[in-house]
Amino acid sequence: MASKIDASGINNSQSMPVSGAARFRLRKDLIRMCLRDVLLKAGIPTEWIVPEVLIASSRNGTSGLHLRLRIMRWDDRLPGYALVIQRQFEQRILMMDPIAPEWISGISWQFALDDEPDLPQLPHPSSWTRKPAPGADSSANTPMFQPSANSPLQ
């Protein structure tokens, strides 16, 4: 009879811990599956954002997994939705493994593009902190990556 192992690394049929390597593989697969589910549900091709799972250790000696989400293909809409993608991933993995916050030590994003996209120049430094004058054109202060209501990534 096959035994069932959950993502926490516990063999449910015999209550015996599994090896660290098996637990890492199981959690890595769970991360990949949850990210894939989120991307497919949003209509984002899965090859655009690829998970890289790293072993991380803290100063107090505990270890966990760090997830680096690597953006492989540029699309102007992705940065505006990165936090939404991350939150939906967090919700999905929490649904699959309620103790995931205990073993996921962090999430970061990396641009790993093959081709350099055409990027705009940064706005004037004061544009980040100044308030627009009343009645002035506020387009200079509008975020470049602001999600729109008719975007397919919503």
Image (cartoon, rainbow, N blue to C red):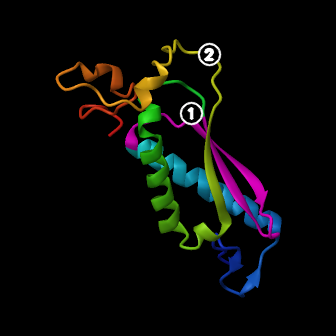
Sequence-wise first label, 1 or 2: 1
| Residue 15 visible in the displayed image | yes
Q: Residue at x 81, y 68 (%)?
A: 20
Is residue 98 part of the magenta span, yes or no? no
Q: Does residue 22 sit above or below 69 in this rendering?
A: below
> As rendered, which of 137 and 31 lies closer to the eye?
137
Q: Image quadrant for the N terminus?
A: bottom right
Is residue 51 part of the magenta span, yes or no? yes
Q: Tell me the magenta residue range.
A: 42-70
Could you tell me how far apart the alpha carbons at marks 1 and 2 are, in whole angstroms?
Answer: 15 Å
> As rendered, which of 96 and 148 lies closer to the eye?
148
Q: How many residues crowd mark 2 within 10 Å: few (<14), some (14–19), many (20+)? A: few
Q: Position of residue 73 (x, y in %)?
A: 55, 25
Q: Does residue 16 sit above or below 104 in this rendering?
A: below
Q: What amino acid type is highlighted by mark number 1?
A: Glu
Q: Residue at x 32, y 40 (%)?
A: 154
Q: How many residues crowd mark 1 within 10 Å: few (<14), some (14–19), many (20+)? A: few
Q: Position of residue 101 (x, y in %)?
A: 59, 67
Q: Position of residue 138 (x, y in %)?
A: 27, 23
Q: Residue at x 65, y 29 (%)?
A: 112
Report the residue marked by disc 2: 115
Q: Does residue 58 sit above or below 140 in this rendering?
A: below
Report the residue marked by disc 1: 47
